Image (cartoon, rainbow, N blue to C red):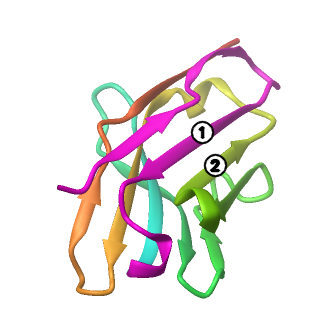
C-alpha cells in the first residue's frame, strides 16, 4: 500500500521560512506529477504548486516567488520550500502524488501556522 508522509510543518512568525517534505513509499519515477495543496479553516482546499515528472514546476499566484517545489529522486521525496511566510499561508498542507496510471495518493497533511 502506498504511503505518503508529510513533515516539516510548525509555527513560524510572519516573514519566516519552513520546508515541507513529502516522502513516498513509491518511486518518483512512477509518478506523473506531485502537487501540494492547502486548506485553511472553513475554506476549500486550494492548489499550491506542482512538479511534473519532467521537473517542470507551476505555482499558484498567491505563492509565486515565495514558494519553491523540488524533489529528491533518490529519497522519493518532494519538498516545498516556503519563504516570506504570511499569516494567510496558515493552513494544513497536503501532498498528492499522481501516478503514471492516473491514480492519486494523498498524504494526511501537516499544519503550518504563521503568526503576525
Residue 35: image location, x then y, percent: 46, 62
Give me the residue at 71% from left, 45% from top.
81
Magenta stretch encompasses residue 2: yes
Does residue 103 sit above or below 59 in this rendering? below
Question: Where does the N terminus fall, quadrant-wise?
Answer: bottom left
- Asked if residue 102 is positioned above or below residue 85 in the image, the reply reads below
Q: Nearer the viewer, residue 86 or 27?
A: 27
Residue farthest to the front?
74
Report which quarter residue 16 is drawn in.
top right
Lower sequence index among marks 2 and 1: 1
Q: Which residue is mark 2?
A: 80
Q: Position of residue 93 (x, y in %)?
A: 44, 39
**Magenta residues, as a range?**
1-30
Q: Secondary structure at mark 2?
A: strand
Name the residue located 27 percent from the left edge and 28 percent from the top edge: 42
* In front of the other: 20 or 46: 20
Q: Nearer the viewer, residue 74 or 104?
A: 74
Residue in the picture at 58% in, 29% down: 8
What is the quadrant of the C terminus in the image? Answer: top right
CB atoms at circles 2 and 1 under 8 Å apart? yes
Give the residue pinned by disc 1. 20
Amino acid at each position: 500500500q502506498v504511503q505518503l508522509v508529510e513533515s516539516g510543518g510548525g509555527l513560524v512568525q510572519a516573514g519566516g521560512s519552513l520546508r515541507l517534505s513529502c516522502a513516498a513509499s513509491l518511486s518518483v519515477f512512477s509518478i506523473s506529477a506531485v502537487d501540494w495543496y492547502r486548506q485553511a479553516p472553513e475554506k476549500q482546499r486550494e492548489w499550491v504548486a506542482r512538479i511534473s515528472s519532467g521537473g517542470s514546476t507551476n505555482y499558484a499566484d498567491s505563492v509565486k516567488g515565495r514558494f519553491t517545489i523540488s524533489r529528491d529522486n533518490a529519497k522519493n521525496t518532494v519538498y516545498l520550500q516556503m519563504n516570506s511566510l504570511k499569516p494567510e499561508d496558515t493552513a494544513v498542507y497536503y501532498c498528492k502524488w499522481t501516478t503514471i496510471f492516473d491514480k492519486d495518493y494523498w498524504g494526511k497533511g501537516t499544519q503550518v501556522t504563521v503568526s503576525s
